[in-house]
Image: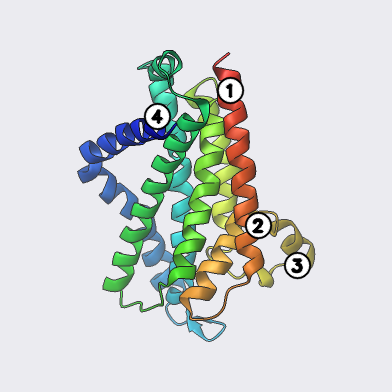
Amino acid sequence: MIRGWIAIYYRELLIIKRRLSRMLPSMAVSPLLYMIAFGYAVGKDMTVDGYPYMAFLLPGLAAMSSMTQAFAIASEINIARFYWHIFEEFQAAPISRAAYVLGETAAGMTRAMMSVCVILIMGFFFGITLSYNLFFWLAILLNSFVFASLAVGLAMLVKSHADQAMVTNFVITPMAFLGGTFFPVDRLPDWAQYILQFLPLTHASDAARASAFGKTPDITSYIILAAVGILFFSMAFFCVNRAKK
C-alpha cells in the first residue's frame, strides 16, 4: 500500500510541477478579487469584533480556498478517467483501493495548501499581519482532508463533466458564501446558524480565524472536521471499490 499511494501521489505531483506556472496565478485570481471587492470597496472602514474587515476576511478566504482547491482534484480524476483512461490502468495495476484514495486525497490536500500559501503571501503585501500558528494550519489541513476525500468519492459517481459542474454548484458554491467566509455566522437568524453548523467550512473558518487572531479555537471544530474527514474518506474507499467492480 505504501508504494501504491506514493506512486499515485507522485504522478499528481508531476502534473502539478508541469502546470505550476499556470496554477499559481489561477489560485490567486479569485482571492485577489475578493480582497479588492470586499476588503477595500465594501469593508475598508468596517470592523468585525474589533478587527479590521480585511483581517477578518483573510482566514475565511484561506479556509474557502483550501476547500475549493482540495475539491478540484475531482476534475483531475474525471479527466484521467474519461479521456486518458488512467483509472483503468490503476485497476489493472497491483494498487489497493485504499492506496488510490490516499494518493489522490493527498494530492488534493497539496493543492489546497499551495493555494493557502498564495493567499497568505498576498495578505502580506496587503499589510495584513495575523498569527499563522499550529492551530491555524491544523484547521486548514483538516478542511483540505475533508474536501479532498469528498472529491475522490464523488469523482467515482459522476458520469460526465456536466455532472461534476452540477455537484460543484450545489455543494461547494453555497458553502463558499455561507460558511463564514465573508461574514460572521452569528449575524444570521438562529435557525440559519443551526443549519450552517452542519457545514465543515463553517468550523474550518471559525477555527482558522480564532487561531489567526491569537485566540484559543474551539476544539469541537477540529473534532468535527476530523470525524467528517474520516467519514468522507471511508465513503471514497467505498465508491472506488464499487467503481473497480
Q: What residue is drawn where x is 50% and y is 21%?
A: 160
Gap between marks 2 and 1 measured at Cα: 26 Å
Q: Nearer the viewer, mark 4 or mark 3?
A: 4
Is 234 drawn above or below residue 229 in the view shown?
A: above
Q: Which residue is mark 2?
A: 224
Gap between marks 3 and 1 measured at Cα: 42 Å
Q: Which residue is mark 1?
A: 241
Q: Which residue is mark 4?
A: 4
Residue type pointed to by label 2: Ile
Q: What residue is drawn where x is 26% and y is 50%?
A: 25
Residue type pointed to by label 1: Asn
Label 4 with label 3: CB-CB less than 8 Å: no
Q: What residue is drawn where x is 51% and y is 62%?
A: 139
The earlier-in-sequence mark between 2 and 1 is 2
Instruction: Point out which mark residue 177 bears.
Output: none
Quadrant location, the N terminus: top left
Q: Nearer the viewer, mark 3 or mark 1?
A: 1
The earlier-in-sequence mark between 4 and 2 is 4
Gap between marks 4 and 2 measured at Cα: 29 Å
